[in-house]
Amino acid sequence: MTDFVEDVTTVSGTDFVEKVDDGGGGGGGGAVDSVFGRTGTVTAQTGDYTAAQVAAAPDSATFITQTPSSGLSGEQAMSALGTGLVKNTTGTGVQSIAVAGTDYVIPADAVLKSLYDAQTVLAAVTDNTPAAVTMAASTILARLASGDIKAATVAEILTLLGNPYVPGGTDVAVADGGTGASTTIAARASLAPDIGYQAAVIRPITGFWYAVGQNPLGTVGLGSGNNTYDAGTQWYAEFMFASAASIDRVAVCTHSAGTATVGRFSLYDDDGFGRPTGTPTDFGTKTLVSGLSELTVSQVITPGKYYHLGFAVNSLTSAANIKANMKGLAPGGRTSDPSSAANSNGAEYYTTGVTGAPPSNPSLSEFQGSSATVSKFSGPQMFVRIA
């Protein structure tokens, strides 16, 4: 340790020396009481030293930073670059974003996102060559019967699917699950099990009798004349009113009444396919007479709805001949005297074993013209009268 003499004082001829310590410890200068013009307890401040004095890089040197710094004049901020792979330039160290295909090789199976434009899908019509297919509104990606993958229109898809039914489209064939028609009446005719018939549509006028049943639309081998009907067979004659009305009579025409021949009338709803169904309205019985065998009833008929008038010979002692002429007055036709009118109503269905009240949801057999084996060739002539 080195001591320093700060001052010498002589007292009564003796010299006294005031020693000043070097500030202790292992070299270095002693404490100072002023620096850079500041006195007292002195601490370092910004600007006291230069970069060279502290061995630091100058502000003008080139730096790489994440974001720009106002205190640096030569830095390169990475935030100013685009997103991608960083490329370093030899010699300058300048950073940039590498270019695919120029600065590096694209992997052979890579698909660039730049191929994906708005509203597009990638498809290939040549091996290993995906390309964008723009999908316009209301199109479906498809490959039609010929040509490449494309954005197909609705019309093209319908053609591809064989032109199935669409709302507002044309009639759909029965074989394809449709009705083959555009109206209710036409659809019923299309779906009816025996296409040789069409139900009578009545335009009611008060006081007139109307023939009910199915119009024969072709040659179906129907019999004519007067038939002897067996007891227990119930026949059905279909009809519809074009406007609201009520009926006050139902009847059959008889050529000869026989002995104790009792007929029974009933009214059934339609099942939507030209067949009687449900619980019928039982109009009751009538002992047949020669001419017109009529029964008084009171029944409101809803327009536009199909009904089936039922008639059965419940019992007899000797056979009655009931008219079954298939020529003359057609179903739906009107007359003031049905007993003298030649009628041509047909019946598509019949039920056997009916000797009492008419059955609900009857078991039906289909009438097949001359191939019918029950009773006679055709159903009995049936009429309704408008109240």
Image (cartoon, rainbow, N blue to C red):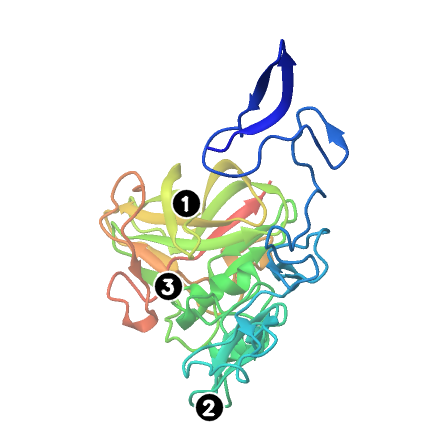
Kind of residue indicated by mark 2: Thr
Q: Give the amino acid type for the residue marked by disc 1 in the picture.
A: Tyr
* Residue bearing mark 1: 268
Identify which residue, 204 or 325, lies in the foreground: 204
In depth, the one of 223 and 5 nearer the eye is: 5
Q: CA distance from mark 2 to mark 3?
A: 80 Å
Q: Residue at image x 63%, y 72%?
A: 136
Quadrant showing the C terminus: top right
Mark nearest the camera among 1 and 2 is 2
* Residue 8 location, quadrant: top right
Crowding around mark 1 (Cα neighbors within 10 Å: few <14, some 14 to 19, many 20+) is many
Query: In this image, 97 relative to 326: left or right?
Result: right
Residue 91 locus on image (x, y percent): 58, 79
Q: Which is nearer the N-term, disc 1 or disc 3?
A: 3
Observer able to see residue 143: no
Query: Comparing marks 2 and 3, which lies closer to the viewer?
Result: 2
Residue at (77, 34) in percent of width and height: 37
For marks 1 and 2, the one nearer the N-term is 2
Q: Is residue 104 above or below residue 168?
A: below
Q: In this figure, which residue is indicated by the disc labeled 3?
A: 226
Q: Mark 2 vs mark 3: which is more N-terminal?
A: 2
Disc 2: which residue:
126
